[in-house]
């Protein structure tokens, strides 16, 4: 899990997690992980920033007058940048995704000016930059100039020597912090100066010529001035950081905590884990051993569900002990280890690889006796070692304890071992300690029928292939399959026959009963699978019918909407036509001469011609009209049919106006009604 951390401090924080015992704290930690895990599914860009270890620097900042070294300041520069980015990311997460639990670890970072000042002063490699101060830049320039004078003068002196006086491949070098040239020891008297070193054979000496001594002193003085300015800069930067020590420490902790949280959230996503209910009964749905998931990831692909078979385990309120029996290599030990690890992961604030609707108690203590603890040095046999562990378990286990016992009662005479195992399990059950035990002892299989709170369980085994399926069956003790496995591995039949005769009748009867139960169980499972398949098919058919019904309803609704729209549009056309015709009629009534009246009649006919075609079939009028019939137009005007034209339209006389109208736009009126008065043309 620590591999998911961005930096070593986050990884160390994950590795250092320990189980909590307060249910509220556990729930809060798991809820925080679940919130961020849900965000990672949709936004994989969320990343923690690795942060260096600045614990020593923080301690030194507490010492007045102290000064941090340049490499420590370089680490602080990286840390300040990580603090700024982390605080910004957490704020963005809360603003964009509304993740209050994740954002709760955010604190304000130190002022940006600190990071800016450090970046200007300290290089990433831990050296002090010339830009740290003007005096430092000036001092280093003086050092460079003084060094150049020394190098130039030494080069000239070396070039002026004879080949017999110079050492082979002679070049200016440094000895004891002073610049020197290598010469043969025979030329020492002629060259003079101070000897700072000599070769192993003493044939070559490294001298500082007399004329260089003063230049060397000037160089040393310039270097000392540079060093003093570097120390002053370091002290100044340290004094700048010291008042912000608490803020820096809090922001550093924020970065580590966020790295730890991101690692746990990514683990939860990759193992497809779900947050269990904390404080309930032991109920595990789809549980998987975390280490098997890790092996599956390395062997095939990340956390392949094809490689690890999940298990379901449900303890009722009155059940405290599960006794798992069955053949070797069936997965019994892996099962009880998985239960212990899943519980401890959850109490450590890590979402375990379990399915939804799971619940886990809060265990105040976990005891385990798994594996062979024999010790030659301690003079402990296998059985003695197990008994020693059992003693410590019985001394401390009680309500709120989880006890894991592998192969309880083994390592000694089966009768005595079984008796001790039965007494131990009964005692733990009476104390209400949750106990998971594995065994091969047949006598213990009847314990569940005799003791309230103890229940049998087994891991399913294929009797035909003699291979485990690793599926947990609660309430059914497991068969050992020892003789069947021996037969498959080639043990002679006469030996097997004698062995079978030696098996007690009660054991054979129990084995036949268990075989019958297993067969019946497989039949029930097959029937249940068949029913599940049929139920899924029926559900699919029901969903298809529901989809068709919804589609039909949608089509009917669309049809109604289209019809309503067409009616509304037709009504709008008719209203517009009515306005146009009424305007033309009003102009006709107001006509003062024959020419104006004709023009008005033409306008009326054009208006009706223009709008009538748009509304044909919408008025619902009569088509079987005769000359002389009294009719009403769509505008409510009553007239008399004067002519049936060959194009299907009719001529209607309305007052002094003759109209050419489609019969669909006319409605026959009562012929006995009194005709309207003919208006007098003005």
Image (tube, helix red, strand yellow):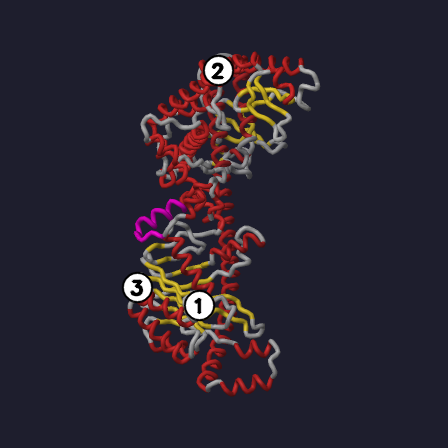
Q: Where is 248 relative to 339, above or below?
A: above
Instruction: Give the camera-side residue of 618 and 375.
Output: 375
N-terminal of the pair, mark 1 or mark 3, is 1
Instruction: Give the camera-side residue of 125 and 516.
Output: 125
Residue carrying label 2: 222
Residue drawn 48% across the image and 60% down it: 310
* Residue 44 seen in the figure: yes
In magenta segment, residue 31: yes
Label annotation for residue 374: 1
Alpha carbons under labels 3 and 2: distance apart: 73 Å
Q: Where is 640 relative to 527, above or below?
A: above
N-terminal of the pair, mark 3 or mark 2, is 2
**Range drawn in magenta:** 19-33
- In the image, taking residue 517 as reference, residue 424 lies left or right, namely left
Can you tell which of label 3 and label 2 is closer to the viewer? 2
Residue carrying label 3: 396
Alpha carbons under labels 1 and 2: distance apart: 72 Å
Predominant secondary structure in magenta?
helix
Secondary element at image label 1: loop
């Amino acid at each position: 899990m620590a591999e998911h951390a961005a930096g070593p401090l986050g990884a160390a924080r994950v590795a250092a997690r320990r189980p909590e015992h307060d249910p509220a704290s556990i729930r809060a930690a798991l809820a925080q992980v679940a919130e961020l895990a849900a965000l990672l599914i949709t936004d994989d860009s969320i990343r923690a920033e690795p942060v260096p270890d600045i614990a020593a620097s923080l301690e030194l900042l507490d010492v007045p007058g102290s000064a941090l070294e340049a490499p420590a300041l370089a680490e602080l520069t990286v840390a300040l940048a990580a603090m700024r980015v982390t605080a910004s990311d957490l704020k963005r997460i809360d603003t964009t995704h509304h993740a209050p639990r994740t954002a709760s670890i955010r604190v304000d970072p130190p002022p940006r000016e600190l990071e800016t000042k450090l970046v200007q002063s300290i290089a990433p490699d831990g050296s002090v930059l010339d830009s740290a101060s003007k005096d430092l830049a000036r001092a280093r320039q003086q050092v460079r100039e003084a060094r150049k004078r020394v190098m130039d003068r030494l080069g000239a002196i070396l070039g002026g020597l004879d080949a017999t006086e110079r050492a082979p491949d002679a070049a200016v070098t440094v000895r004891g912090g002073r610049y020197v040239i290598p010469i043969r020891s025979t030329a020492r008297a002629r060259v003079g100066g101070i000897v700072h070193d000599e070769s192993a054979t003493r044939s070559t000496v490294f001298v500082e010529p007399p004329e260089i001594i003063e230049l060397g002193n000037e160089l040393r003085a310039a270097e000392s001035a540079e060093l003093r300015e570097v120390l002053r800069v370091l002290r100044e930067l340290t004094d700048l950081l010291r008042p912000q020590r608490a803020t820096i420490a809090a922001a550093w902790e924020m970065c580590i905590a966020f790295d730890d949280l991101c690692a746990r959230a990514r683990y939860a996503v990759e193992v497809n884990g779900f947050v269990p209910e904390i404080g309930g009964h032991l109920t595990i749905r789809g549980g998987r051993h975390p280490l098997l998931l890790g092996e599956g990831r390395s062997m095939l692909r990340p956390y392949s569900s094809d490689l690890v078979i999940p298990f379901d385990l449900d303890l009722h309120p009155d059940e405290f002990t599960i006794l798992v029996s069955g053949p070797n290599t069936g997965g019994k030990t892996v099962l009880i280890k998985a239960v212990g690890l899943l519980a401890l992961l959850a109490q450590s604030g890590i979402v375990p690889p379990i399915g939804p609707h799971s619940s886990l108690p809060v265990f105040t203590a976990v005891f385990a006796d798994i594996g062979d603890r024999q010790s030659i040095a301690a003079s402990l046999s296998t059985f003695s070692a197990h008994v020693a562990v059992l003693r410590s378990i019985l001394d401390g286990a009680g309500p709120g304890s989880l006890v894991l016992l592998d192969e309880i009662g083994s390592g000694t005479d089966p009768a005595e071992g079984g008796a001790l195992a039965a007494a131990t399990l009964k005692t733990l059950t009476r104390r209400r300690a949750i106990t998971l035990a594995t065994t091969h002892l047949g006598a213990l299989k009847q314990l569940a029928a005799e003791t309230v709170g103890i229940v049998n369980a087994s891991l399913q085994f294929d009797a035909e292939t003699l291979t485990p399926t690793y599926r947990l069956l609660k309430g059914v003790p497991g068969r050992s399959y020892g003789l069947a496995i021996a037969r498959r591995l080639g043990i002679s039949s006469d030996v097997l026959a004698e062995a079978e005769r030696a098996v007690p009748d009660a054991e054979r009867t129990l084995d036949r009963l268990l075989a019958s139960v297993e067969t019946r169980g497989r039949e029930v499972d097959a029937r249940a699978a068949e029913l599940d398949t049929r139920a899924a098919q029926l559900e699919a058919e029901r969903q298809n019918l529901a989809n068709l019904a919804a589609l039909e309803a949608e089509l009917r609704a669309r049809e109604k909407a289209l019809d309503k729209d067409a009616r509304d549009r037709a009504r709008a056309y008719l209203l517009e036509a009515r306005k146009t015709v009424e305007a033309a009629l009003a102009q006709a009534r107001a006509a003062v001469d024959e020419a104006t009246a004709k023009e008005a009649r033409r306008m009326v006919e054009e208006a009706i011609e223009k709008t009538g075609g748009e509304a044909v079939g919408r008025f619902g009028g009569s088509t079987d009209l005769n000359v002389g019939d009294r009719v009403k137009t769509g505008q409510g005007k009553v007239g008399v049919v004067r002519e049936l034209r060959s194009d299907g339209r009719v001529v209607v006389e309305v007052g002094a106006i003759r109209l050419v109208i489609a019969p669909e736009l006319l409605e026959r009126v009562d012929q006995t009604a009194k005709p309207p008065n003919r208006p007098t043309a003005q």
